[in-house]
Image (cartoon, helix red, strand yellow):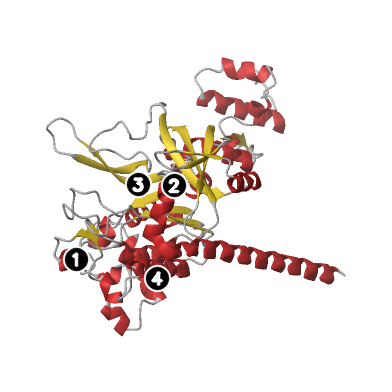
Amino acid sequence: MPRVPRRMYTEAEARAVIKRELLLRRTNDSEPIEKRKEDGDEDLANSQDGLTISKDGFQKETKKICYLLEKLPFEVRTLIYRIPFRRPTAIAPSDIRYKFGKKPTLSIYSYQWNNLRQDGHGESFLPKYDGSHADVNVAWRSKATLEQSRAIGAGKYKKCASTGERELSHTTYKEDIDAKVKHYVYQAGDSPAQVVNRAVVSVTGIQGVALLGTCKQLLEECRVVLYGENTFAFNTCGPRGQVPYKDSLGLHAYDAFQDRPHEIPGLKTIQTKRSGGMTQGRINHAINIMFDKDTTHQPQPFMARDPLIKFFRNIGPSSASHVTSVILEGHFRTADNTRKSRQRPISFRRTLPIHSTILKNVCPKLRKLVLSQAYVDPFTALFDDVRDRRLKLTFEGRVDLVVGQVLAALPTLQVLQLGNPHPAPSCESAVAVALWGRSLRWEGVVESRYQRAEEFAEEERKKSGRRKKQRKI
C-alpha cells in the first residue's frame, strides 16, 4: 500500500492548530468559542484565559488585564473607592457588646458612629450592613464666609429663647453628603466668630473592606481613602459603672503606668529623667513593641487598654500612617472627692503627651486634631487629680500647658479644635471658655503657623522655578 505523504503545515498554521487544541482542552464546549471566533473576537483569537503560543510551539502565560486598575484613571478610581469607604461622620473604633438571652456578654472589636454610640447591649445604633440607612447628626466648625460675616455683624440671625443658639437665616446644600446644612454662630472668648455647620445625613456601614486583600495596588489606593479621608474618634473617658472605677470618668487605672513604663512612648518617669529623657531611639523601640502582635508577649496594661493604641495595633503601621484626622476625648478631672488621692484614674493631662508622641511618629500625614472634654462641675462632682496639683498651677494654666506641649510635638498640624461642636453652639461657646480658658488661643496659633509654612513653601517653589530658568539660559 503506497504511503500517503504527511501534510506539511506552515508555521502560522501549526501555531493555529496547537492553539485550537489547547483551547479545546481548557473548555468542554467548543461551540461558543468557535462562534465567538466567527464573530471576530480578536481577544479570543490572540489569547484565551491568558494562554498564548510562542513561536517554538510552547504554551506561555500572558498578563491578565485588570480593567479597574489599568483602564480607569486614578481620579475615577478614587471616586469609586469613596462610595464604600468614606463616611461623613466620625468613626469610633471600640468594643461592641452583644448579649443573647441569658448567655454572657460577648464583645467584638469593631466600630460605631461617634455621634450614635451603642447604648448598653442594644444594636439599633450600630452601623448597618444590609443596605439600610441610619440618620446621624453631624457637625463641624468652619470659618465664616464673607456673606456669613456680614450677617453676623448685622445681627441677621434667629436666637432661640430656650437654648440661646443663634441660627443664621439661610441654609445651604452640601453635595458630597447630600444634605441640607444649617449654620449657627459660634464665638468662644475673644476669638473671631466662627460658624458651626449641622446636618442630618443618611449613612450605611462600611462595606467592601475585603477588597483591600486582593492586590497590593488596591490595598494602597483604598486605604488612602479609608484611613486618610475619614475622621477617627477615641474616647478615653470610660463610662460610669464600668471599670476601672464605678464613679470615675477615666478609662485608665491609677497604676496603669507602673508595669514596664519603658514600653509606653513619650511617658516621662524618674528613670527616664535620670538617664537623659525619652530619646528617639527609646520611642522607636516602644512603638515597635506597640505594633508587635506576638501572642506570647503580654501587652503593657495602658497600651492594651488605650483605644488609640489598640486601633493602630489592629490596622498596622502602614495603614496608620495615612490617618489625617483624629478626635481625642478625655477628662482633666477624673475622680470624685470621695476617692482616695492615690487611687484616682489617670487624667487627660498625662495621656495627651503620650498620644501626641504616638501621633507624631506613626501619623506623619496628620492634619487635624480635635480635643474634647465633657463639662463636669468642679465644685460638686469631680476635681483635679492630686498628681496634677504638683505643678502648682491653676486648672486653666494646666490645660494651657498641656495643649502647648501637644502642639510642640505636632509641627505639621494644620487645624486644632478645642471642644465638641455637636451641642448647641451657644452652650458650647460658654462651656469652651470654662473648660479651655486661655488655651483657646492655640487654635489661632496653629492656623497662623500653617499659613506661614504655606507662604514659605510658596516662596521656595518660586525660587526653585527661577533657578531652573537661569540654568536653561
Viewer-nearest of discs 3 and 2 = 2
Name the amino acid type tagged 3: Pro
Disc 1 element: loop
For disc 3, the marked residue is 93
Earlier-in-chain disc, 4 versus 3: 3
Residues at discs 1 and 4 in contact (Cβ within 8 Å): no
Spatial separation of the CA atoms under disc 1 and disc 4: 24 Å
The amino acid type found where label 4 is placed reads Leu
Q: Residue at x 64, y 46 (%)?
A: 150
Residue position marked by numbered label 4 in the rendering: 401
Q: Secondary structure at mark 3?
A: strand
What number is the disc on residue 309?
none
Callout 2 amino acid: Ser
Badge 3 or badge 2: first in the primary sequence: 3
Q: Earlier in the sequence, mark 1 or mark 4?
A: 1
Above or below: residue 406 compared with residue 52: below
Q: Quadrant of the C terminus?
A: bottom right
**Sequence order check, earlier mark of 2 and 4:** 4
Does 8 sit left or right of 422 as displayed?
A: right
Quote the CA–CA distance across marks 3 and 2: 29 Å
Which residue is the site of mark 2? 426
- Residue 299 appears anywhere in the view: no
